[in-house]
Amino acid sequence: MGQPSFKRWMRWISIPLVMIMLAILFLPINPSIYAQSGAKAKKENGLKEVIGLRTEKSKTFVKSDGKTFVTEQYLEPIHYKESGKWINIKERNKSGLQAKRLSGGMTYVNLGHQTRFAFADKSTSPNLVRFEQGKAKIDFRLTGSHPVTVKRQVNGIVYPNVYEGIDLVYQVEATGVKEEWVLHKRTGPSTFSMALNTENTKPVLQKDGSIQFVAPNGKVIFVVPVPFMYDQNDAASHKVKFQLRQKGGVTYLDLKADEQWLKDPKRAYPVVIDPTVGLQGVKSTYDNFVSSKNPTQNYRLFPFVISGTHPDYGIARSFIKFDLPALPEGAQITNAQVYLQQYSTEQEQQIDLFQVTSDWTSSGVNWENQPSVGNVFSHAKVAGAGEYAWDLTGLAKGWYQGTEKNYGFSLRHHDEANDRKSFRSSDYLEDISKRPKLLITYRVEPSVPIAQPTIAAKSHILLDYQTGLPLYGNQTDQPLPPASMTKMMTEYIVLEEIHNNKLSWDDMVQVSARAAGIEEAQIDLQPGEQMTVKDLFMGMAVYSANDATVALAERVAGSETDFVHRMNATAQAMDLKNSHFRNATGLEMTDYPDPPQVGGEHLMSARDAAVLARKLLQTYPEFSQLISAPQYTFRPGTTREKKVVNWNRMLPGFDHFYPGVDGLKTGSTLAAGYCFTGTAKQEGHRLITVVMGTSSEDSRFVETKKLLDYGFNRYEMATLVKRGETIGGAVLRVPNGDGQSTPVYGKREIRIPIYRGERDQYTIKVRFYTGLKAPLKAGTTVGVAQVFYRGLPVRGLPMYPVAITKSVNEASQVQQFFRQVNEGFQQWIE
């Protein structure tokens, strides 16, 4: 009895011992939840930046414990979107303002928004600076300047010495363009003129002295606030004004600075004159200061904020408010600090922070209109130039817990009669890292999930493009009227015809009277008119034109009825179980004067729409370029020219723009409501979304944004096994083999969407085929690999074939004899 008990005890104790040994060998110490994730990591100040957590105004770092994060939040954007990725503006500047060449010796600078900015290589170019937004265009040209060449520097674009001792500097920001006339000495002019050439907009001088550029429909596109100037001692003057004048049929914008202020012996040169060009619809930045000496003056565009007493301002107080960065659910804040860069005086002063307790705006605050404040909650001793920090931990916790409203804080001298301290503001150009920033440190467990969004639609689905795996959805298989999302099937069949050489883009199609008579969205086709397949396809894809769709259907199949039969056959071949088509357009049958002769109901499920969209993108890669065109012109240069705009308002340049969106198809009818099949790609990860039966044109994009936000924040793509890579822990032993344990490798890449930050929760298990016998050649498929998450198989994924890395030879008769003896001996011992 004693021996079996000892063996049983050894078996029990061996299990935890083996697990401990495996953990020591294979599990990392203090693993970073993002270091395992496949997201790019960047080391900074002993931390690793989590690139996937970048936002427009923040970056986040993770400490080595994998649970402590530091989010660095700025007042203005520090990143811009390009091809679905957040790009560091500072890195762009260091690389010389990466730009695209335009005609006429100009370069175009992009920061991911709908406005284009272009700058000439030479100061004497016919157009020095250009702003474009939609159809509106503004060109500025210098008059009488020195011929100089542009210099691209870290702090922007510089035209040095355009006039004697004067530089012209531009910095492209997410909120607009900062223009600075930098006067190095008092020798040049005090009035600066630029000739204007505008299209689809005109400048209007406002009563307050600002300039508005207004579109023909009355919409304000650009605003140039009242300019100001300041010297190196922070002395400032608002005695700068704009003047619009006409001469010889040319419009000129004059910038006139006060001559007496510039000549004052107290001036500390260089002096900067700042007429900023702002974009409409951009959220305001919250940092400003107020002046007791100039109680109604607003200083929101100044590159500094002040606390204490200054000869030009009297007593100055500053106000700052940060947008709060989103933190993961369950995050525990351990520290919060605000950092400000002081640059003016040397004497040590105590600067106090007061909690602001009422609402305010940067454009509305002045000495007579200050928000209310509470008690001092933090203070710091500030001496010479450098960065200083104030603790905000308690207040930040209150903000996030909802016990305190975030109205920001006020910066004030403990003794306001003392000499001022000046700090860099959000408008400081030289180095954006010296602008105010808020650092929030928090801890979070790796498994904390991102909450699933509530989608206001009859049905919806979020689908991973690469694997076809559904990631989230509701009523995904419910057949519903799809409206013009129907046209995705029409597009698929037309592209199939082109790829099978049965149709070409340049083929001319003669439009029938029936096709020309189809109403709703149209490109105004006329009976007998001829148009290319390409133009008709673009009418269908960009503008959802029903007349163009029917013309193509008739060209492919002879009649729309026969075309619809092919649509249903194709749907069946794609295994779209909950789809049936009655026409090629998605219109309600009552909208047809002569409807196709196909019975049943016209329906499609959200899952079927997503599968069809995936099939389109996979089979015809060029499709995304066609459907992402923002606009298209038919019959250009003729009296029947027609320009149409894409219905997909999530594309770049539209009001619902979402980074990475490049398709796909909208639809709306009375029965269907508002529908949208969308797709977006960020950092190599493409998602497909479908919403059906939303309540309005805007809501279909709002609900799609929720799905995309959830998808990109909750999931990331991870390569669990590369093609040809050995799968750790999986070895093959064949009963009649030579006794060697043979490793196996993946014959296909295993790349799937995983929960962000949980790479270590995914494992690969290999199941070998039964009945394998030696000899086996290297490369022979011997089983399949399956993906598991926290011990459970991931549903919806295929089995991945595995093969042996080397040949398995048959054991010799002697080897087989001793193996049988050994097995018998083991059985006898048991």
Image (tube, rainbow, N blue to C red):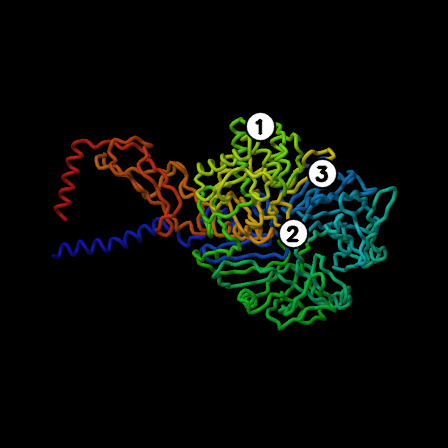
The residues tagged by marks 3 and 2 sit, at their Cα atoms, a distance apart of 25 Å
Q: Residues within 10 Å of mark 3 (few under 14, many from 20)?
A: many
Label 3 secondary element? strand
Say which amino acid is labelled 3.
Met
Residue 560 found in image quarter: top right
Residue 491, picture quadrant: top right
Q: From the top left corner, tell me how far across and down residue 37 is, in percent.
A: 45, 48
Q: Is residue 799 left or right of residue 667?
A: left
User: Residue 270: in sight, yes or no?
Assistant: no
Count of residue discs? 3
Q: Is residue 275 above or below residue 807?
A: below
Question: In what quadrant of the picture does the N terminus appear?
Answer: bottom left
Task: Name the residue type under label 1.
Answer: Ser
Residue located at (60% from left, 45% from top): 648
In the figure, 59 relative to 603: above or below? Answer: below
Residue 431 numbered tag: 2
Dividing the picture into quadrants, the one containing residue 636 is: top right
Q: Which residue is mark 3?
A: 106
Residue 784 lies, in percent from the top left, at 33, 40
Q: Position of residue 76 (x, y in %)?
A: 64, 55
> Disc 2 or 1, which lies upstream in sequence?
2
Asked whether 384 or 42 is in front, the reply is 42
Label 1 secondary element: loop
In front: mark 3 or mark 1?
1
**Among numbered discs 3 and 1, the one appearing first in the sequence:** 3
The answer to whether marks 3 and 2 mark residues whose Cβ atoms lie closer than 8 Å is: no
Q: Residues within 10 Å of mark 1 (few under 14, many from 20)?
A: some
Instruction: Give the camera-side residue of 206 and 186.
Output: 206
Q: Residue 439 at x, y = what percent?
A: 56, 59
Looking at the rendered structure, the secondary structure element under dot 2 is: loop
